[in-house]
Image (spheres, rainbow, N blue to C red):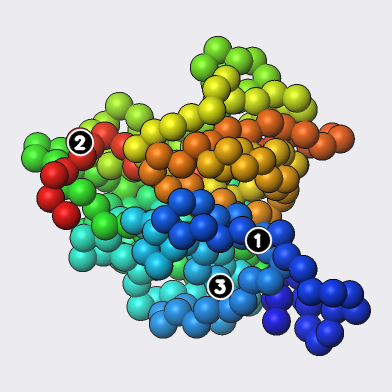
Amino acid sequence: MGYKNGQTGYPGAPLASRAVIKKNNYALIPPAGLVKNRVPGFDNCEMTILASRKLGASFVDYVVTMLPEGKNDLGFGGDGVETFVYVLDGRIRAGDGSRDYALERDGYLYLPPDKKLYLENRAGGNSELFLYKRLYQPLAGHQPRAFAGNAGEIKSYDYEGMKDVQIWDLLPTDDLGFDMNFHILSFERGASHGYIETHVQEHGALILEGEGIYNLDNEWLTVGKGDYIFMAAYTLQAAYGIGRSECFRYLYSKDCNRDESLKE
């Protein structure tokens, strides 16, 4: 069952998919064809695991539909695992057991690896979330901290000097306590990266709006709202904004602020 698009039964046309899965390299996962994954602790929630170690990622990404009375009161993360939640739609309560945060659309919360994340749907209907977890990489003399915000209240800036490409930093960029960050990147129609990137960082990206053409390991793929992209370390990557009206905009994670280890 493709639960995100309500597809059940025979499709009335030959089976086809835009999905591309190249493990340890890149993946394009569109909403059509997503199936539900039962994750203990999430009650009255429909969710899909998008990226994981089985795909080649060092993190796990999820999309979550919190139904009325949806919640996680068992706790998510902690014990060395840092977490991040972003509200795509709706309204939720998110907290660490001692402090709660009221998050609405474009609101988000990062919790450090010694805190568990608790979630509760506070909307009259469903709430849609993007959820992330990763093993934290400690750095002597530095510690991360809980950080909440709303992307709609953050000032963007020109991406590498290009006025038609804007970037929003969701977490502090000057604090070595953080070993990862989340950003939003937005391209006006016809705008692009300044070059095809090649770097050690890996990304998980959810397309928030619009359409684009994305270069993944020198394959150009059409992507749009609701699509998810995984990019492994050193995967060639770049994008153009296309479409007729909306900017091409996506939310993405990036590991940062750490040297590479020689140990496995």
**Sooner in the amino-acid sequence: mark 3 or mark 1:** 1
**Sooner in the amino-acid sequence: mark 3 or mark 2:** 3
Disc 3 on helix, strand or loop? strand
Residue at the farthest front position: 218
Q: Residues within 10 Å of mark 1 (few under 14, many from 20)?
A: some
**Quadrant that contains the N terminus:** bottom right
User: Residue tagged by mark 2?
Assistant: 259
Position of 197 with respect to 117 (left or right) is right
Image marks 3 and 1: residues in contact by CB distance under 8 Å: no
Residue at the farthest left position: 140
Q: Horizontal and vertical percent for residue 218? A: 58, 38
Residue at the farthest top position: 161
Question: In the rendered structure, which amino acid carries the disc numbered 3?
Answer: Met
**The quarter of the displayed image where residue 95 is located:** bottom left
Q: Residues within 10 Å of mark 2 (few under 14, many from 20)?
A: few
Position of 68 with respect to 132 (left or right) is right
Q: Is residue 154 visible?
A: no
In the picture, the disc for residue 19 is 1
Disc 2 on helix, strand or loop? loop
Q: Horizontal and vertical percent for residue 157? A: 55, 20
Question: In the rendered structure, which amino acid carries the disc numbered 2?
Answer: Asp
**Sooner in the amino-acid sequence: mark 1 or mark 2:** 1
In the picture, the disc for residue 1 is none
Inter-mark Cα distance, 3 to 1: 18 Å
Q: Is residue 100 above or below residue 186?
A: below
Q: Is residue 203 above or below residue 32?
A: above
Residue at 41%, 82% in the rendered image: 40
Residue at 68%, 55% in the rendered image: 226
Image marks 3 and 2: residues in contact by CB distance under 8 Å: no
Residue at 40%, 67% in the rendered image: 54
User: Residue tagged by mark 3?
Assistant: 47
Residue at 86%, 35% in the rendered image: 244
